[in-house]
Amino acid sequence: MEFVQRDDVRRLLGSADPDAALTLVGGKIVIAPEAEAEGLVIVSRRDLEQRLTGEDLSDHDLDELADALDTVARDLGA
């Protein structure tokens, strides 16, 4: 079972909150302000944007990001 999906990455990058973070709460992905996150923070929007080159991301790119972030979540103990 994958935790992080393409739409989760899309929601994080599209969030109006510059402090948004992708978090895992009770087995579900939640986009919330990093300072208010109640679960495991996988990545903040700012950190993710810094790693990207500003290019438009295809669905394939988003899928690859989701897979990588899913691995991060599992490595962090999800």
Image (tube, rainbow, N blue to C red):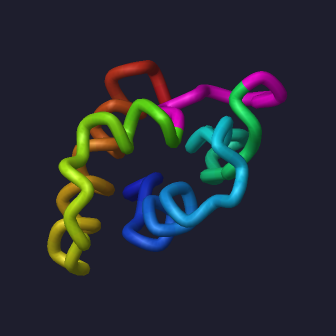
Q: Residue furthest front?
A: 54
Q: Which residues are magenta?
A: 35-44
Q: 39 left or right of 36?
A: left
Q: Is residue 73 above or below residue 56?
A: above
Magenta segment: does it hold 36?
Answer: yes
Q: 35 left or right of 42?
A: right
Q: Quadrant of residue 9?
A: bottom left
Percent position of residue 44, x then y? 52, 34
Q: 23 left or right of 48?
A: right
Measuring 64% from the left and 60% from the top, which residue is drawn there?
15
Percent position of residue 11, x then y? 56, 66
Q: Nearer the viewer, residue 78 or 38?
A: 38
Measuring 33% from the left and 31% from the top, which residue is drawn there?
72
Q: Is residue 21 above or below residue 10?
A: above
Magenta segment: does it hold 1?
Answer: no
Measuring 26% from the left and 56% from the top, which residue is drawn there?
54
